[in-house]
Amino acid sequence: MDGKQTYQSVDGVAMLVLTMGEDIGSEVLKGFTHEEIKQITHAMSKMKDIKAKDALVSLSGFFDDFRKHSGILGGTRQYITNVLEKTLNGNLARDLVSEIYGDEIRSHAEKLAWIPPELLVNDLKKEHINLQALLIAHLPLEYSGRVMDEYEEEECHALILQISKTQVLTSGLMETLKDLIDRCKINYHSGGSASLQGSKVVANLINRYSGDKSNLFQFLHDQDAEAAELVEEAMFDFFTLFNQDLETINLINERVSLEQWTYALKGTNKDCRLYIINSMPQRVSTELKENLVRIGAVPVSQVEQARKDIIEIVKQMQSEEIIKLNFANEPRLT
């Protein structure tokens, strides 16, 4: 294997970066993709007791390749952009370059792959679904799959539909996406999204805990009642209601209006809807089923508001000791 081939291998590049020192090496690595950086640094970590002849092969290969280079940079993106901007309107030039290369946003978004998927999704969910879909469509494929795993099934369906409709990006959309990407990076690096909220972390752990949750909650209450209440608060969302027994649901039904249930149940699965519907008298349940069909598709904001209103009602009932929510129950869907 000649010097040039060694240089082009991952081990060859790793060797070169090691010879550059930390500062220059880190600048060079910025030019690689997320996956390439992982490969190179993994190779670097395995290099021990480097022989002079091995280093010489990598360095010689690099300088041989450098000497053979013509010095003409070729049709670089920046060069073509500059030419087109002098030929066309600035926006037209950018749109044409994006169509030719199709990677402006992709290269900008690539650095997001260092952010844990759950943290990125926390930021994305604050944005319109169109923006979420566009950004996910331009993430590295392996990483975008992990990001999609953080969404609920119905959210995934909606995002995939949006992604399938994605066409050539306009300059305005590209700038909006770049701004979103920058904000996601800033949020992560500032530590805002990564702050540890103990009660929320414990809530997520308990949700995935396969042991006896009743004993676990009893232990938490015995050790620190205030901490246990914070955990329960963190665990409580709309879908907690489907873990309650029918007696509790019947009491909740006395406070929650039919209209609120109609909007709140939109987007839930069949089992969730039936659990609430079957808890009601036949006349009321029939009316609820008819309402669900009648209103058709509704804005997500209306669904979220209805669920929020129901949660507030349930919290109030809990504080008045009318009901006691059980966070240790398994789902009671029928």
Image: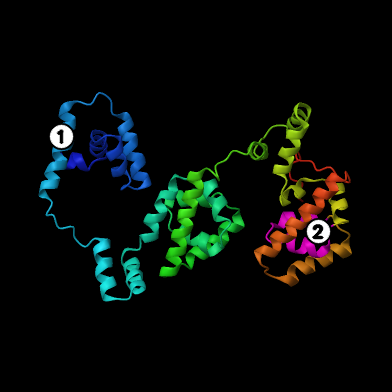
Q: Is residue 48 visible?
A: yes
Colour mapping used in the image: rainbow
In this image, 120 relative to 331: left or right? Answer: left
Q: Which of the 4 image quadrants contains residue 264?
A: bottom right
Residues drawn in magenta: 256-278
Q: Which of the 4 image quadrants contains residue 47?
A: top left
Give, as a three-letter code, the residue at label 1. Answer: Val
- On the image, the x and y values in percent for residue 169 come to 42, 68
Q: Which residue is mark 1?
A: 57
Q: Which of the 4 image quadrants contains residue 197?
A: top right
Residue at horizontal 46 percent and vertical 59 percent from the top? 179
Q: Residue furthest bottom?
A: 88
Give, as a three-letter code, the residue at label 2. Answer: Ile
| Crowd around label 2: few <14 · some 14–19 · many ≥20 (10 Å) | some
Nearest to N terminus: mark 1 or mark 2: 1
Q: Residue furthest top?
A: 49
Q: Which residue is mark 2?
A: 277
Q: Nearer the viewer, residue 164 or 180?
A: 180
**Is 229 one of the magenta-colored residues?**
no
Residue at horizontal 30 percent and vertical 35 percent from the top? 22
**Is 275 one of the magenta-colored residues?**
yes
Q: Which numbered disc, 1 or 2, marks the residue closer to the eye?
A: 1
Q: Is residue 273 visible?
A: no
Q: Is residue 76 above or below residue 314?
A: below
| Secondary structure found at label 1 | helix
Q: Nearer the viewer, residue 220 or 197?
A: 197
Q: Separation of disc 1 and disc 2 at Cα?
A: 74 Å
In this image, 64 relative to 319: left or right? Answer: left
| Crowd around label 1: few <14 · some 14–19 · many ≥20 (10 Å) | some
- On the image, the x and y values in percent for residue 234 come to 70, 43
Q: Quadrant of the N terminus?
A: top left
| Secondary structure found at label 2 | helix
